[in-house]
Each structure stands twice: as structure tokens, then as C-alpha cells.
Image (tube, coloured by chain):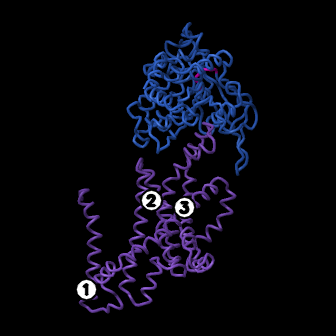
Chain colours: A blue, B purple
């Protein structure tokens, strides 16, 4: 009985669970300010119809705690890029490091949490057992597991559904379980491949607000694949706009939104969070969706996506 | 529309009514129309024999049932183990495919005398081996199918978690295959009983249901032969119902719509193979 209480106490203080992880996080924040570093990466798929250049000359750096969206039309390689970072695939040329390690080592060390377009829950496990899966696989003690799962389900607002099975939940709830599962081991990096792609617009906006809050709370860096411009704008610190065949980065658009835009980096926050994003993102609410700066950013991303030679970038700066 | 209760009642009452009508017509043919008791013993005389030779029927059922059970267990274990290997290494799958195909069509009629003389006239081993061979095929086929049902998203999740092969088997592959394995065992259960029984016709120790049916028929005790047939049907049903209950019990925790659907589809697809082997074993 005492174990959950003990575990619950530090949660309220929004501090890491154990001294070990706390030390690791501090070390990471000082020693490895970049979460992901992609250098001159090419990816070529050999298919029956010949070679397909999925990615060409990709250079991208994601700072610790930064939220970066990858956006582009189908076939631009955005999912492939995320899969390379996750070590679900290997690049043909170039190098990727995740917290200074190879992707394979980062995967073995469980440096990232991952969520796919499909929730991918195991149908024979309850919601709680699904969230506990990574903890179970990596040998967490059962009492810790229970406390952690409770806290995670609380975070995604599904505490009352712990004993349900996935088929008893709506698509949005299943996706929330999948996100809770991806956060189970407090990863410093979250990889998300269109996790809200299959959801209706209402659920989607709710999930986006939840994700903004959660990513700010956990301080994790996020690489978020999407094909929705408003989604990318609402969530991200930077939006990476990609073009297809071969997949290239066309432009990286930094997001400046709402009152938090630009200067709003809290001085106190700057010392704890290496990236300015966490603090700024925490302030994002649904109201922002109707803010003028939001529409300007949507326009900026759209024009980058369509390659229109308009002076939106300058206009965006002026308005602010 | 029928209320659920009416529907349930109907589902129980309808087959009983059909059975009663058939038995009634049968009795009518024998005792009123006058079909010779020699050709077709009446249900009443079969029941009489059933009561009269109850002890020998019970002991015969136990002998045949034990052979079928041992065969079913051994065959199922081998089927699951080999399917696991075939799912893991494609080479094993390709190497075993022709062997499995041969096993699926092996005529028990041909194999029984050979095995009986191989293991001696006083050994039940030959019969158990035949039941095991008959059980092996549906379990193997279904299990292999089940092992291949894991979805890419689950496999990638396991890879992202850096799960060991043993962990993948325990947390993903086996639970995914579970409904398929149980369906295979359920199909195998009937086959095991049929093969154990048929194998008794071809020598080996006496005392099982199969050998008693043939002895009774040979000595023109047709009513008694029919009583043993009734016992064989009961034994087969017992095996089927127990495995069905096992299936329900294991899947009870979560009979999702998805799982139920896969069971149904796998039953219908493996139905062909089971019919084939049943025909062969007769």
C-alpha cells in the first residue's frame, strides 16, 4: 500500500520519479543539448520497379525539449525519416545520432517513446496492462509499474478506464492509451507518426491540446509526422516542410504564436529547459486557434508547402 | 422478431424434437412396419443392450478414450512446437510442407496394421501414434496460421521496445495465435477419437470400442454393436465439448468481435482439411 503513495508524491512536484532518472536527465540537459541530429541522410528503397529515392540530403537537428513537425505530401519521406530515427529502418547514406548515440543504441537504451497512426494496442490486454507493457518488458517492479500506470492514465484522462479492453474504447481513447504507453518510460524523445490521422476533427483538436500540455509537462523532444498544416502549426516549435520524389527538406519554418511569440521565453524557464519551446508551448490553448498569428503561421507553412514565392515570411515578422 | 429467450428455447428444443421424431420413426419402422431386427435393431433393443453390457461399454470407452487423449495431447504439442519452428525459420516451413501434406492424407486404414505389427499385438502404442498423427495436422496448420497473424504495427512496437525473441513470443506471438491454436485442438479432438477407434479394427489388443463393435457385428449381435456405436458417438462428443469449453474458457477473458471473427473464418477454412482427413480415416 505504501508504494503507490510514495510514487505519487514526487509526481505532484512534477519531478522525475527516481534519483537515477533525475540524475540522467540533468546530465543529458547539460551534456547533450541535441536530441536528434540527422546529417546528409539518403534513403533508397530497392523495389521491383527499380530504386525509389525516399530521402535525399536530409539535414535536421532537433534540440532537447523541442517540438518539431515533419509535414509534406504523401511520399515525401516524412514517415521514413521518423522510422530512421527510431531505427525501424537504416539510412542508405549519411548519419543519424539520437542523444549522441547511434539510433540502434538509442533504441536498445530505450531513449525514445513511439506512437503510430494506429494505436496498436494488444486487444487481449486491459488498458492498464497495455500502458504497462514497456515497463513490463524492461523489468520494472510490479508496484512501481502500477503507480506509474495510474499516473499516466490520469494524465491522458482515462483513469476510469484502466480495466477496460481496447475494443471497448473509442478511437480517440485508444490513441490516448497509445500515447500514455509511449510516455511510460519518461523518454526524452517522442516519435509520433500521424497519431491523430484517423481521428475526427473534434477529437483531434482535443488530443492536440492534450499533447501540447503533456509535452510541456514532460519536457520531452517530439518529432511529429503529420499532413495537417493547422496541426503542425498548433503543436510545433518548428515545422519542417518536405517535398516528394525525392524526399527533401524544402524549408524549416519556426513558429511564432500568440502572446508567447518570440520574446516570451521565461527567464526562469531558460535555465531548466534548454529549448525555449517548452515554456512557450505550455501557454498554447484552444483560443490560439483563432488567433491572428495562428493564421499567419498556417499561411506561412502552406506557402512553403506549395512553394509559392510570396513574401509571407516578411509579413509575418512585420505583424508581430 | 423473436425475443432472445424464445430463440434460446428454440435452439435447445428444436434438435431434441428432431431427435425424438427420428427415433420414433425408427422404432415405428421396426416394430410396426416390421423391418427385420436383424437388419435394423430397434432403438429400444439398443438401449436394452446399452444397459445390459454397461460395464464392458464403460471400460471399452475408457481404453479408446485414453488412446485418443494421449494421441491428442502428443499430436497437439508436436503440432504447436513444429509450427513455432516453421514460423520462425522459413526453411523449416518449406522442408516440412511436403511432410505435412503427406501426413494429412495418410490413410489410417493402411497405417494401422503396420504400426500394430511394429509395436506388438499387446501394445496400445500404435493406436496412440495414429491418433497423434491425425491430431497433429489440424493443430499444426492452425497454429502456423495463428503465428502469422501478428500485425506490422505490433511487430514494430516490439522492435522499438527492443524486446528479446522470447519476450516477443510470450507477449505478442502466442497470445495472437491462441484462438487459432485452440480451434486446431478442437478440430483435432474429434479426429483423435475417430482414428483411435478405427485403428482398433486392425489388430492389436482387444477391449476398445472399435474392436468390440467389430466382434459384436461378426457374431451377429447387432443391437450390441449399435450400443457400442452409441458409446463411440458419446466419446467423440465428449472430446469435442471439452475442447470447445476449453476454448471458451481461455478466450472468455476477452472475446472481442475481432477474435470471434477470426475463429469463425479459421474454422471454415480448416473445415476442408478436417473433412478430408475424416473421410480418409474411415
Q: Is residue A176 above or below residue B129?
A: above
- Give A80 or A137, whichever is nearer the viewer: A137
For marks 1 and 2 on the same chain, the one whose residue lies earlier in the sequence: 1
Do residues under tags 3 and 2 come within 8 Å of each other at their CB atoms? no
Q: Residue B28's mark?
A: 1
In percent of the image, x 50 and y 39: which residue is there? A119
- Give A29 or A138, whichever is nearer the viewer: A138
Q: Is residue A195 magenta?
A: no
Q: Residue B76's mark?
A: 3
Task: Quarter of the image for the N terminus of chain A: give it.
Answer: top left
Query: Which residue of the protein is positioned furthest toward the right in this rendering?
Result: A93
Q: Is residue A66 magenta?
A: yes
Whole-percent x, y for residue A287 in the image: 43, 19
**Quadrant of residue A106 in the image?**
top right
Which residue is labeled 2 in the image?
B264
For marks 3 and 2 on the same chain, the one whose residue lies earlier in the sequence: 3
Mark 3, secondary structure of its residue: helix
Specify the segment rendered in magenta: A63-68
Task: Determine whether, in the image, residue A197 is placed left or right of residue B164.
Answer: left
Q: Is residue B115 above or below residue B94?
A: below
Using the numbered discs, state the Cα–Cα distance from disc 1 to disc 3 in whole angstroms: 45 Å
- Give A102 or B143, whichever is nearer the viewer: B143
Mark 2, secondary structure of its residue: helix
Using the numbered discs, state the Cα–Cα distance from disc 3 to disc 2 in whole angstroms: 20 Å
Task: Quarter of the image for the C terminus of chain A: give it.
Answer: top right
Amino acid at each position: 500500500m505504501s508504494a503507490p503513495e510514495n510514487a505519487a508524491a514526487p509526481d505532484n512536484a512534477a519531478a522525475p520519479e527516481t534519483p537515477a532518472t533525475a540524475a540522467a536527465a540533468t546530465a543529458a540537459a547539460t551534456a547533450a543539448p541535441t536530441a536528434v541530429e540527422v546529417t546528409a541522410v539518403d534513403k533508397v528503397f530497392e523495389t521491383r520497379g527499380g530504386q525509389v529515392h525516399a530521402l535525399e540530403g536530409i539535414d535536421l537537428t532537433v534540440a532537447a525539449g523541442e517540438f518539431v513537425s515533419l509535414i509534406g505530401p504523401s511520399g515525401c519521406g516524412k514517415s521514413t525519416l521518423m522510422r530512421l530515427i527510431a531505427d525501424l529502418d537504416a539510412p542508405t547514406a549519411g548519419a543519424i545520432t539520437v542523444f549522441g548515440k547511434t539510433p540502434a543504441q538509442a533504441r536498445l537504451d530505450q531513449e525514445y517513446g513511439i506512437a503510430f497512426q494506429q494505436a496498436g494496442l494488444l486487444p487481449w490486454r486491459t488498458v492498464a496492462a497495455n500502458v504497462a507493457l514497456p515497463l513490463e518488458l524492461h523489468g520494472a517492479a510490479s508496484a512501481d509499474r502500477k503507480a506509474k500506470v495510474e499516473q499516466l492514465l490520469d494524465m491522458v484522462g482515462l483513469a476510469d478506464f484502466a480495466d477496460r479492453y481496447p475494443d471497448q474504447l473509442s478511437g480517440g481513447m485508444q490513441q490516448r492509451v497509445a500515447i500514455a504507453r509511449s510516455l511510460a518510460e519518461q523518454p526524452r524523445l517522442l516519435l509520433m507518426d500521424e497519431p491523430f490521422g484517423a481521428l475526427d476533427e473534434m477529437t483531434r483538436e482535443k488530443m492536440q491540446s492534450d499533447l501540447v500540455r503533456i509535452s510541456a509537462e514532460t519536457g520531452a523532444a517530439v518529432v511529429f509526422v503529420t499532413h495537417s498544416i493547422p496541426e503542425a502549426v498548433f503543436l510545433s516549435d518548428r515545422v519542417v516542410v518536405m517535398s516528394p520524389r525525392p524526399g527533401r527538406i524544402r524549408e524549416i519554418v519556426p513558429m511564432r504564436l500568440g502572446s508567447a511569440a518570440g520574446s516570451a521565453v521565461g527567464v526562469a524557464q531558460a535555465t531548466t529547459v534548454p529549448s525555449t519551446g517548452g515554456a512557450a508551448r505550455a501557454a498554447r490553448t484552444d483560443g490560439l486557434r483563432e488567433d491572428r498569428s495562428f493564421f499567419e503561421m498556417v499561411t506561412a507553412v502552406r506557402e512553403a508547402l506549395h512553394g509559392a514565392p510570396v513574401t509571407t515570411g516578411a509579413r509575418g515578422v512585420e505583424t508581430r | 422478431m423473436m425475443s432472445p429467450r424464445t430463440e434460446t428455447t428454440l435452439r435447445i428444443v428444436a434438435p431434441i424434437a428432431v431427435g425424438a421424431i427420428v427415433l420414433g420413426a425408427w422404432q415405428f419402422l421396426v416394430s410396426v412396419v416390421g423391418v427385420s431386427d436383424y437388419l435394423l435393431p430397434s432403438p429400444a433393443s439398443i438401449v436394452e443392450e446399452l444397459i445390459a453390457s454397461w460395464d464392458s461399454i464403460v471400460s471399452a470407452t475408457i481404453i479408446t478414450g485414453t488412446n485418443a487423449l494421449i494421441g491428442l495431447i502428443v499430436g497437439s504439442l508436436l503440432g504447436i512446437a513444429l509450427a513455432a519452428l516453421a514460423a520462425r525459420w522459413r526453411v523449416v516451413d518449406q522442408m516440412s510442407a511436403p511432410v505435412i501434406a503427406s501426413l494429412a492424407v495418410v490413410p489410417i486404414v493402411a497405417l494401422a496394421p503396420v504400426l500394430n505389427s511394429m509395436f506388438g499385438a499387446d501394445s496400445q502404442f500404435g493406436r496412440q501414434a495414429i491418433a497423434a498423427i491425425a491430431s497433429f495436422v489440424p493443430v499444426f496448420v492452425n497454429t502456423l496460421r495463428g503465428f502469422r497473424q501478428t500485425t506490422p504495427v505490433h511487430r514494430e512496437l516490439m522492435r522499438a521496445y527492443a524486446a528479446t525473441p522470447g519476450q516477443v513470443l510470450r507477449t505478442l506471438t502466442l497470445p495472437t495465435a491462441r484462438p487459432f491454436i485452440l480451434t486446431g485442438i478442437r478440430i483435432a479432438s474429434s479426429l483423435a477419437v475417430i482414428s483411435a477407434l478405427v485403428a482398433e479394427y486392425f489388430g492389436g489388443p482387444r477391449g476398445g470400442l472399435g474392436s468390440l463393435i467389430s466382434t459384436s457385428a461378426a457374431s451377429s449381435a447387432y443391437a450390441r454393436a449399435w450400443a457400442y456405436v452409441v458409446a463411440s458417438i458419446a466419446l467423440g462428443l465428449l472430446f469435442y465439448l471439452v475442447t470447445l469449453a476449453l476454448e471458451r474458457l481461455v478466450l472468455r477473458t476477452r472475446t472481442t468481435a475481432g477474435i470471434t471473427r477470426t475463429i469463425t473464418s479459421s474454422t471454415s477454412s480448416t473445415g476442408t482439411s478436417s473433412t478430408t482427413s475424416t473421410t480418409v480415416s474411415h
